[in-house]
Image (cartoon, helix red, strand yellow):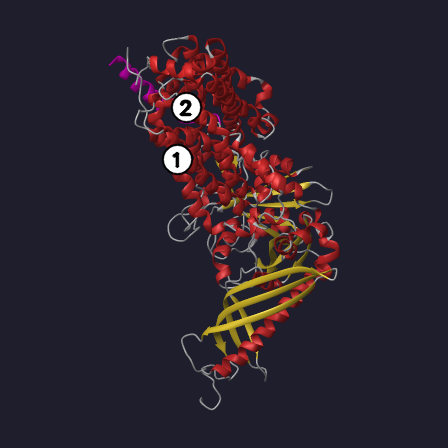
Amino acid sequence: MIKKLILIAACISAAVFMTGCWSSREPKELAIVDSSLYDKLPDGSYKVTAEIMNPAGIGGAGMLGSGSGNKSPFVTFSGTGPSIREAIKCISLSREMKDFGQHNKARFLSERFARDGIAPFLDLIARERFTDEKPHLIVVRSENPEKIYDCMLGISSMPGDYIENLYKHQPADSAHGVFVTTLEFMKAYLTEGREPVAGLATIVESADRPSGNVGLTTGSGAGRSPVNYRIRYEGLAAFKDGRLVGFLDCEGAEAYNIIMGKAKAAFFTVPVGDGRSTVIDITESRCEIKSDIAGGKAVVKINVKASGNVSEEGSGIDITTSEGLKSIRRALEKQIEEQLSKTVNKVQNELASDIFGFGEFLHIQHPDKWRGIKDRWNDDYFPFAEVSVSVKTNIMTTGKIDKPISLPGEHK
Amino acid sequence: MRKKPLITSFQLVMMALGSALVFPYMFMPILNGPPANQDVWFVLILTLPYIIVINAPILFIMRRFRGRSAAETFEMIMGKPIGKTFAFFNVLFFIFCSTACMDITGLFIKIYFMSETPFWAIIVFLIVPLAYLSFKGAGAIGRSAPFLIMFLIFTIFFFFIFGIGKMDPKDLQPVLAESTFFDLNLGAFLTAARYSEILILFVFSFYLSKQANIIKAFGVALSVFAVCFMLILLPTIMVLGDEYARHSFSAYYSFAGQVEAFGFITRVQALFVLALFPVAILKVTMYNYMASHVLAGVLGAKSHRAFVIPFAAVSFAVCMIPVMQKTHTFLFLTSDRFFPFVILPVIFVIPVIMLIVYFFRRKKISAALMSKVPEGEDEAK
């Protein structure tokens, strides 16, 4: 009986006194990082800006992010140092809470930082305990990348959340942007025959009407002057050997998404003569890549199979007939082929970075040939590879109506 | 005198399984072993016949000496002085395993979760439940195992199912194109040489109910181990890629951090922590108990209990040596340069010697087996 009593007393004592340990952290004492920005300054030092959630400015009655009073939903802290880690440490000189990086949703990289090479940055992310590989990796194209924290964020309350919401919804509407997590970037960086890409955010002036929510339209500082720029998330940033080497615009990113089989929604305005056109929404695409070495040159065959629906018909072609659809399909295939070829050419000639992973396909399909050329792939083979593109499309549905509203001879 | 506790075949399988799964779950040494590429899943398949071959001598001895304690078996085959020496080697090996596993687990916790907690505190928190459970004996260990190991297995299936969306089979290609026959077999041999769980069956089969089939228990433990290991290995490679997985101390933990589904199943690596810690403690406990139990047999002590705390104290003291708290030590202990070569003499060389001696002395041993009633164990159930 006495033993049982001692045991019960020990359990109660343990429950009371052992609620935490040396490494315990109370949520109220955490500075929860929502996004972070990495920059390289002209003097060679690093600057890291952390966007920290401000619980007092988030939530409340009514709308998302309506906040309490006039408080901003986030604050930013910056630190500089000779290394990235020291710059992060420097933030703690002015921030009173313990940082918590596991809720970080986006890592923004300035163009300067990315061009300088991000291998030490990747090493830090993989090595440190307070970081993880989930956040999206995005290059910010702007002279002043810190503006990203002053941009209009639609109805999201914080830049990190804004990117997360874009990731959830943009791919269903457009293939003009790419979303790459830190892990995906790291995998591509470490994979033989593939170079990584990152998302691209450009800060542009805007005349759009802001939401009016407190803190949302005025960036990090409630009470600042109303912002007149916003984030345009389209295109991609291409890397080679861990350094940013260039960008692809929205059409290039769309081609990239199609070749990588990631396009869930791609709209093509297909010209069919007389300045008229039909819009096809590609909802599904699959791509098969065959890579080989023949005659001392790399030969790559890209076969795309895509299916989609008629989204807008203004060509005057009767799409209820198979002939009508066939002519649109042919024009669509030609257009996609041209767009993919143009993008691949640009990547080969201007970026010289195998972001499509043609080398990886060669590695998988012909490992014996890959072994002999892998060290020369990037410089001697990829830029001079003969790439052929073949596209087959299938138009599945014509939407809620069959005959076009404006079919010649049938409308007033 | 109290009766010796009985453990069921299921409990024994769970004990061996849990001990075997802790290391793949925690740091997956197979990734960095030969051929160190995307073909390591094939190495795992090749490992199974190697395990069977390496464990065959000890399996034979176990079957032949069913119901005898480990110390008794050593003495019956090798004679008293050499038998005691062999048993003592086993004791040293068990203390080593207990200490190394404690150190590795402590370092893992320190690196990944509790960087600000002093290392000694982490080890103390491992040692307290270890000492309690080991003190209570085989029955308590056997009863704990199914609960803890079943949860560990549940997490393996859970991570696999909800990680499917992120897996890319391309990461397993090219298949068998870049691995030599020698590398594949060397990798399989080194992985098999780590499988010291046969010793758990050897020591704990003393408590196994008579109806239980020890060979079947071994087969079931090995089969489930292979399936679970494959379910750990494949998604890790297909999500992280073999190159990044090799860079990571705990590739499976990194993979678990990527698992998410339906927008609300997210950050489920907490399950990893919940599953791993108790099973790691159980593994350390089992080795502490085995060391105590065999030494008690060697010295003719009535109970193993007198040795539990001293052995735990030895493990604690070794873990406190500064060099044992370094990453290099962690890497060395978990590498193929060390563990397999410590384990192999105990699970293969000594049993082979015993087997040879047994065949030379089998008539005498058989007579002794007929005349000597298996000993009991003064131990609480």
Q: Nearer the viewer, mark 1 or mark 2?
A: 2
Question: Mark 2 is on which residue type?
Answer: Met
Tag 1 secondary structure? helix
Callout 1: few (<14), some (14-19), or many (20+) C-alpha neighbours within 10 Å?
Answer: some
Tell me the number on the disc at residue B54. none
> In the rendered structure, does residue A14 fall within the stretch colored magenta?
yes
Q: Examine the rendering and report whether any part of residue B149 can be seen.
A: yes
Question: Mark 1 is on which residue type?
Answer: Val
For disc 2, the chain is B
Residue A155 lies left or right of residue A242; in this view the side is left
Q: Nearer the viewer, residue B163 or A109?
A: B163
Residue A140 lies left or right of residue A33; in this view the side is right
The residue tagged 2 is B62
| Main SS category, magenta section | helix
Callout 2: few (<14), some (14-19), or many (20+) C-alpha neighbours within 10 Å?
Answer: many
**Residue A123 placement (x, y as % from top left):** 63, 40
For the residues labelled 1 and 2, say whether their Cβ atoms are less than 8 Å apart.
Answer: no
The residue tagged 1 is B220
Looking at the image, is mark 1 or mark 2 earlier in the sequence? 2
The range drawn in magenta is A1-23
Which quadrant is the C terminus of chain A positioned in?
A: bottom left
**Residue B203 placement (x, y as % from top left):** 41, 21
> In the rendered structure, does residue A248 fall within the stretch colored magenta?
no
Q: Residue at x 37, y 33 (%)?
A: B216
Q: Nearer the viewer, residue A223 or A63?
A: A63
Q: In which image quadrant can residue A357 be found? A: bottom right
Residue B85 lies left or right of residue A192; in this view the side is left
